[in-house]
Image (cartoon, helix red, strand yellow):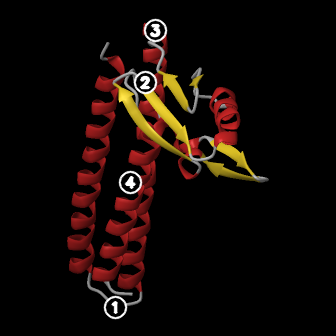
Amino acid sequence: MSIVEIKQQATQKMQQSLESFQHNLTKIRTGRANPGLLDTVHVDYYGSMVPISQVANVALLDARTISVSPWEKGMGAKIEKAIRDSDLGLNPASQGDLIRVPMPAMTEERRKELTKVVRAEGEHAKVAIRNLRRDANDGVKKLVKDKLASEDDERRSQEEIQKFTDRFIADVDKLVTGKEQDIMAV
């Protein structure tokens, strides 16, 4: 494996870590409704657990309400129960075929709790990115040790690896700040 391949692989994995972090942030609820909030909720569909999005249409009614329209009439009660039993703290209300999921207003205490969760998730993402940097640097050092690259190449590549590590960590910080602002907005 060459230095270029090591850097490409590290960049790719860091990008995946960033995307995973972004996905994790969508699961943390803010005061606003977000259809992605129900992605983690699974419902029993003829003996197998499937995401709600595979058995119903999930959409926004307004800024604070998610609507869930089951594709089969018999699924309404199961979907409602799955949402209620999830750890999201939501209380769905059935109106015929439509299930309305109002987003309760968050207390100041809950907002502060969620910002701590966001910061912790951000820190986990940063640690993952730093571990990838370490792995890439170790790969470059191994090439130098095996006499496949010079020490100058090692120093240059470590500087480049550090630059894109810093860039990804800055991206994580931006995402954390943005999510905190979303959470703290009343």
- Residue 3 in picture, x, y percent from top left: 30, 81
Q: Please tell me whether mark 1 sits on a helix, a strand or a loop.
A: loop
Mark 3 or mark 4: which comes first in sequence? 4
Q: Please tell me whether mark 3 sits on a helix, a strand or a loop.
A: loop
Q: Which amino acid lies under the numbered mark 2 shown in the image of this protein?
A: Thr
Q: Please tell me whether mark 2 sits on a helix, a strand or a loop.
A: strand
Tell me where residue 108 sits by quadrant. Answer: top left
Q: Which amino acid lies under the numbered mark 1 shown in the image of this protein?
A: Leu
Residue underneath mark 2: 65
Residue underneath mark 1: 148
Q: Which quarter of the figure is the C terminus placed in?
A: top left
- Residue 138 in picture, x, y percent from top left: 42, 71
- Cα separation between marks 1 and 3: 59 Å
Of labels 4 and 1, the one closer to you = 4
Q: Which amino acid lies under the numbered mark 4 shown in the image of this protein?
A: Glu
State whether residue 29 appears in this view: no
Residue underneath mark 3: 107
Depth check: give the residue in front, 40 or 93.
93
